Amino acid sequence: GENVEQHPSTLSVQEGDSAVIKCTYSDSASNYFPWYKQELGKRPQLIIDIRSNVGEKKDQRIAVTLNKTAKHFSLHITETQPEDSAVYFCAASRVQGAQKLVFGQGTRLTINP
Amino acid sequence: DSGVTQTPKHLITATGQRVTLRCSPRSGDLSVYWYQQSLDQGLQFLIQYYNGEERAKGNILERFSAQQFPDLHSELNLSSLELGDSALYFCASSLGTGELFFGEGSRLTVL
């Protein structure tokens, strides 16, 4: 079945530095790739998403890149701030049909002041 | 506030018991999803409903069942509970365009 692998499982960076989280997916029919942020004890919230017709998308300090050939996508956070500390999940799905959103295992990001 | 309502927020019960978790999706959303998140674990997909019909199934145990009613709210039934069923259960809803909106979750503790 569908599978999404996410790395690393934990990431610690200095405030102001960049953070990169990488994911690979198995279902070649996947065409929707969101990233969710989950703060401790809270619900996951969408921070950015990308569809298969686009290779890169940016939103202020956050960017996502997609390589459909390699079935690989990444989240880039620049100029990290303490409030970026959270668990980040990548996911993949087909937008149509059985729209099962499969999540990666999550990355716990810690921003050190 | 995502617009997705889950009840109860917290539930403590004993092994062998049965519980029902309830979810009301955002107004207009036809799809409802259930996810299980154990301590420090990822989001495990359980099941998806679309307009009352089961659309996709994940690693949902036979002891668990769900349904979506005509008013689009959904219930997740967990029976013969075991200690390992203790987790945060999230409901999410979607218009079908991709983005999922999550509720606050129902935290189940089985003692």
Image (tube, rainbow, N blue to C red):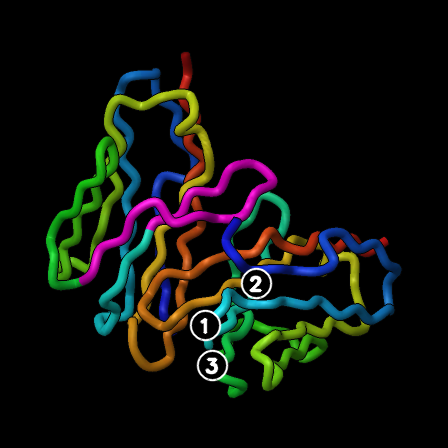
- Give the mark nearer the N terminus: 2 vs 3: 3
Tag 3 secondary structure: strand
Percent x, y of residue B25: 54, 67
Label 2 crowd bin: few (<14), some (14–19), many (20+), radius 10 Å: many
Which region of the structure is painted magenta? A35-51
Q: Farthest residue toward the top?
A: A113
Q: Residue at x 43, y 46 (%)?
A: A106
Judged by depth in the image, the label closer to the viewer, 3 or 1, is: 1
Residue type, numbered disc 1: Gly
Percent x, y of residue B106: 68, 56
The quarter holding residue B36 reads bottom right
Q: Is residue A68 magenta?
A: no
Foreground: A75 or B71?
B71
Question: Do dots 2 and 3 share one subunit?
Answer: yes
The quarter holding residue A71 reads bottom left
Q: In the rendered image, which residue does mark 3 sit on?
A: B50
Residue type, numbered disc 2: Cys
Q: Where residue B91 is drawn, which disc sits there?
A: 2
Badge 1: chain ID: B
- Give the mark nearer the N terminus: 1 vs 2: 1
| Quarter of the figure with the N terminus of chain A | bottom left
Judged by depth in the image, the label closer to the viewer, 1 or 2, is: 1
Q: Where residue B28 is drawn, which disc sits there?
A: 1
How would you classify the magenta stretch by its main secondary structure? strand
Q: Is residue B106 left or right of residue A73?
A: right
Foreground: A75 or B3?
B3
What is the distance, in whole Å, between disc 3 and disc 1 at their CAs?
Answer: 12 Å
